[in-house]
Image: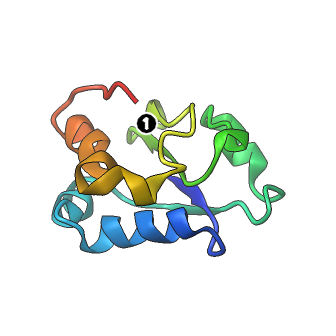
Amino acid sequence: MVFGTNWCGDCRMLDKAMKEGSSASLIARKFRVVKVEVGKFDRNLDVADSCGVPLRKGIPTVAVLSAKGEVLHATRAGERADARKLGENGVHEPFRAIAAGIRPKS
C-alpha cells in the first residue's frame, strides 16, 4: 500500500519510479500495488493506522502486507518522504529485500 496524494511531488516521484524505474519489473511481478489517497491528511487515516503507518512523519509512505494481511514492512519514520532525494536504489531496496524474504531495516 502506498499512502500519498497527487499534490505531493515526492509521491509522484515514487509512483513514477515504481512504474518506470529499474525495479519496476520486480514490483510488477512480486507485488500488488494499492494506492491509498490521504488528501490533506484527512482521508483514509484509519487505513494508515491499521498498518501502523504514521502519516504525520511524511508522505509518501509504504506498507507491504502479506497475502494474509500481515504487515511485513512499513515506513514508520518518514523514510520515503524525501523520495526525490533517495535515488533509484533507495526507493527500491525495501522491495528487493522483501521479495528476497528479508525484512528491510527501514
* Residue at left offset 47%, top offset 31%: 70
Would you say 96 lies left or right of 38 here? left
Q: Position of residue 87 (x, y in %)?
A: 30, 55
Q: Amino acid at mark 1?
A: Lys
* Residue at left offset 30%, top offset 40%: 94
Would you say 27 lies left or right of 68 here? left
Q: Is residue 26 above or below residue 61?
A: below
Helix, strand, or loop for circle 1? loop
Q: Which residue carries the number 1 mark?
A: 68
* Front-lying residue, 27 or 91: 91
Q: Position of residue 16 (x, y in %)?
A: 37, 73
Q: Is residue 71 above or below residue 64?
A: above
Q: Which image quadrant for residue 18? A: bottom left
Check disc 1: other Cα within 10 Å, few if <14, some if 14-19, many if 20+.
few
Residue furthest to the right in view is 42
* Residue at left offset 48%, top offset 47%: 80
Q: Is residue 80 above or below residue 42?
A: above
Q: Which image quadrant for residue 57? A: top right
Residue furthest to the front in view is 85
Q: Quadrant of the C terminus?
A: top left
Image label count: 1
Q: Position of residue 13 (x, y in %)?
A: 43, 68
Q: How is the image coloured?
A: rainbow
* Residue at left offset 80%, top offset 63%: 40
Q: Is residue 26 above or below residue 19?
A: above
